[in-house]
């Protein structure tokens, strides 16, 4: 009997020691926890593939709860982030178009979809007491709103709470005490007063971007709420995750910056994800969006696209009267035919079902058009701008006249290629799409034969699929008639899908060479502070600059003082994101006189990464091949290779 009593007492003590939240393990519900740098579901990594939706206080075209099955089963999102205005008068909501938070939680969590509650009354600011502006919701109002919500959903592990969406002003770079105070107040409300153990999300500073407008430079710790306060908050409160927006401020060197951010957050054991990306027309945040998909796949970075009910052309569908995710032309789970540039990539990302092979490498490709290829303003409107890895909005090709049948655009891929699909995007000017087309392929650029595809068109993002072709040249002929211009912002060609996803190239071990004693020189002779990349940075605005607009033949030259084995060079334009080489050729020499042919040519970006076969040289010259209306700025330069012995 004594042993039995001891056993009962031991069990009682053990049960009392168990955490009171989450209760899901005792009710058959899943358990969501953060562990080191991961969000986990029942002990397994949970990678967010989400969509932002409008909730109480935000306009909808129709009830978002009616789209729950479409979002969960057809699009295959596993998370929705719900925009809420806490001051919303639900008695004035339109029952035909607006859903309450309760309706949203019920509709989505019943389908196994995570619902993130996201207060959005003060994006770019804070819930202050007294409130700013006057009569807007203050911090005490947010506390009063959150406590009953946290109590109501504390036993539903699919409901997560975000302290605030987009806190703080993007132009203020030092994280103020307001950020810490607001977050600690709401965390105490959720954890202590409401006794809720659900995951809570702390979003990054500066409208949520959390990078301090750092341009192409890495985010500084003191410009990032996640990097500067994350460890402190996780020590005080359990089950926290962190998020940030990947908007146009991340465009410059986006993939490199994202990887750098993840390296540093993971070193701190902080679980992070991207809570908004794909904002505005693709030309505004295209590089950041593509980086999210690339890094997300490679490093399991969760991400939430913006948005299901678009208000700023962050659209999932084409054309202008069909933009929301519910507007897809087929809803049986097969790939829709009217996806936008963004929707196309989201669909592939969620379904992991390639319907074509990889995009062909466009290095060395050229283009021409019926306009005669006369550039405007030095470099803009050149046809080969459609191949740029980093394309500002103005660097697109345009017909500069109304659409007429017979207008053409031709691509020379440099050598015969196998392909089965092209994508032609107007870019930010979504109305300047061709109204009809014929697509031709040729091996010699002279004999075209019959079109391999032809149709009318009403989409700003045109995808044309066809049986596998082998050709070197492509010619797109405009067959419609319209008063609008014809514009191309991006031209992509895709290989056939072989049934296998190519393996990643193995990481190359490399060393950033010591630049002590090196010398820099350049053309024109107006270069200012040309030696700046050689010394430690004391000011983030320091840079070497050409001090005048560059023209083909201008260059920046490095003398490493002795021959070195090298294979990669990076140029970083820092805060001066538009002042990078629009086109370059890389030359090397051992005597500074004989340069030979360029090792590699290409298009630049805010972070220009020049990779080439390992070579031995003493001198490096990066020469401009495309003129520009702006100066050329170099904030950082690094050469990678094998140190000389």
Image: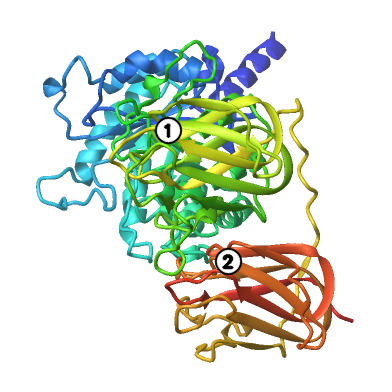
Work out whether residue 36 can be spotted. no
Q: Residue furthest right?
A: 645
Density class for disc 1 (Cα within 10 Å; few <14, some 14-19, many ≥20) is many
Q: Is residue 238 above or below residue 209?
A: above
Q: Is residue 160 left or right of residue 500?
A: left
Residue at x 32% of width, y 29% of height: 309
Q: Quadrant of the C terminus?
A: bottom right
Per the image, the residue denoted by label 1 is 479
Give above or below for 229 relative to 332: below
Give how far across and how far down residue 20 sits, in percent.
48, 26
From the viewer's perspective, is residue 205 above or below residue 537? above
Instruction: Please state the horizontal and vertical placement of residue 361, each as a whole percent of the image.
Output: 68, 47
Secondary structure found at label 2: loop
In which image quadrant can residue 90 be found?
A: top left
Q: Mark 2 points at which residue?
A: 583
Nearer the observer, 644 or 604: 604
Residue 567 horizontal side relative to residue 479, left or right: right
Q: Where 407 sits versus 229, above or below? A: above
Q: Is mark 1 on a helix, strand or loop?
A: loop
Contact, mark 2 vs mark 1 (Cβ under 8 Å): no
Is the residue marked by circle 2 packed among few (<14), some (14-19), or many (20+) residues within 10 Å?
Answer: many
Q: Distance between the residues labelled 2 and 1?
A: 32 Å
Which is in the foreground here, disc 2 or disc 1?
Answer: 1
In front of the other: 477 or 222: 477
Residue at image position (62%, 81%) is: 556
Residue 457: percent from the left, percent from the top? 41, 28
Q: Can residue 193 be seen in this view?
A: yes
Relative image position of residue 347 (x, y in whole percent): 53, 27
Q: Which mark is residue 274?
A: none
């Amino acid at each position: 009997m004594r042993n039995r009593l001891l056993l009962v007492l031991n069990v009682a003590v053990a049960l009392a020691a168990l955490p009171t939240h989450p209760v899901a393990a005792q009710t058959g519900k899943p358990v969501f926890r953060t562990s080191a740098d991961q969000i986990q579901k029942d002990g397994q990594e949970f990678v967010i593939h989400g969509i932002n939706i409008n909730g109480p206080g935000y306009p909808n075209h129709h009830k978002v709860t009616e789209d729950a099955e479409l979002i969960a089963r057809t699009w295959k999102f596993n998370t929705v982030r719900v925009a809420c205005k806490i001051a919303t008068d639900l008695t004035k909501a339109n029952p035909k178009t607006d859903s309450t938070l309760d309706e949203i939680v019920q509709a989505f969590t019943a389908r196994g979809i995570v619902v993130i509650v996201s207060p959005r009354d003060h994006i770019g600011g804070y819930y202050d007491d007294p409130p700013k502006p006057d009569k807007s919701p203050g911090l005490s109002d947010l506390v009063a709103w959150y406590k009953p919500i946290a109590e109501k959903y504390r036993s539903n592990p699919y409901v997560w709470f975000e302290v605030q969406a987009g806190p703080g002003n993007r132009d203020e770079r030092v994280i103020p005490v307001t950020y810490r105070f607001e977050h600690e107040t709401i965390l105490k409300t959720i954890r202590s007063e409401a006794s809720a153990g659900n995951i809570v999300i702390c979003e990054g500073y500066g409208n949520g971007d959390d990078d301090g407008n750092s341009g192409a430079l890495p985010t500084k710790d003191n410009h990032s709420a996640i990097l500067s306060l994350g460890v402190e908050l996780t020590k005080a409160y359990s089950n926290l995750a962190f998020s940030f927006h990947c908007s146009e401020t991340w465009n410059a060197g986006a993939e490199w910056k994202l990887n750098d951010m993840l390296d540093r957050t993971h070193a701190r054991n902080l679980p992070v994800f991207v809570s908004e990306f794909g904002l505005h027309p693709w030309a505004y945040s295209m590089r950041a969006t593509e980086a999210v998909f690339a890094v997300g796949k490679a490093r399991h970075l969760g991400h939430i696209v913006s948005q299901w009910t678009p208000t700023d052309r962050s659209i999932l569908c084409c054309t202008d009267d069909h933009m929301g995710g519910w507007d897809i032309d087929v809803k049986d789970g097969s790939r829709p035919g009217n996806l936008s540039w963004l929707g196309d990539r989201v669909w592939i990302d969620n379904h992991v079902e390639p319907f074509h092979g990889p995009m062909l490498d466009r290095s060395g490709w050229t283009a021409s058009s019926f306009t005669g290829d006369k550039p405007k303003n030095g470099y803009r409107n050149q046809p080969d701008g459609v191949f740029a890895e980093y394309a500002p909005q103005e660097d697109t090709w345009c017909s500069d006249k109304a659409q007429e049948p017979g207008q053409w655009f031709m691509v020379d891929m440099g050598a015969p290629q196998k392909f089965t699909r092209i994508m032609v995007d107007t870019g930010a000017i979504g109305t300047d799409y061709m109204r009809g087309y014929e697509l031709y392929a040729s091996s010699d650029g002279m004999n075209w034969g019959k079109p391999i595809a032809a149709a009318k068109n009403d989409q700003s993002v045109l995808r044309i699929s066809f049986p596998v072709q082998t050709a070197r040249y492509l010619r797109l002929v405009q067959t419609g008639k319209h008063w609008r211009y014809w514009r191309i912002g991006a031209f992509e060609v895709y290989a056939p899908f072989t049934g296998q996803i190519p393996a990643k190239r193995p990481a190359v071990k490399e060393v950033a060479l010591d630049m002590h004693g090196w010398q820099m020189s350049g053309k024109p002779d107006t270069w200012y502070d040309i030696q700046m990349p050689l010394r430690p940075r004391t000011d983030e605005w320091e840079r070497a600059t050409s001090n005048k607009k560059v023209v083909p033949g201008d260059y920046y030259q490095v003398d490493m003082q002795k021959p070195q084995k090298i294979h990669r060079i990076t140029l970083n334009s820092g805060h001066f994101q538009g002042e990078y080489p629009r086109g370059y050729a890389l030359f090397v020499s051992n005597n500074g006189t004989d340069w030979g042919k360029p090792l590699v040519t290409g298009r630049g970006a805010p972070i220009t990464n020049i990779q080439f076969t390992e070579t031995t040289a003493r001198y490096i010259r990066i020469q401009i091949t495309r003129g520009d209306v702006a100066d050329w700025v170099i904030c950082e330069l690094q050469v990678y290779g094998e140190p000389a012995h």
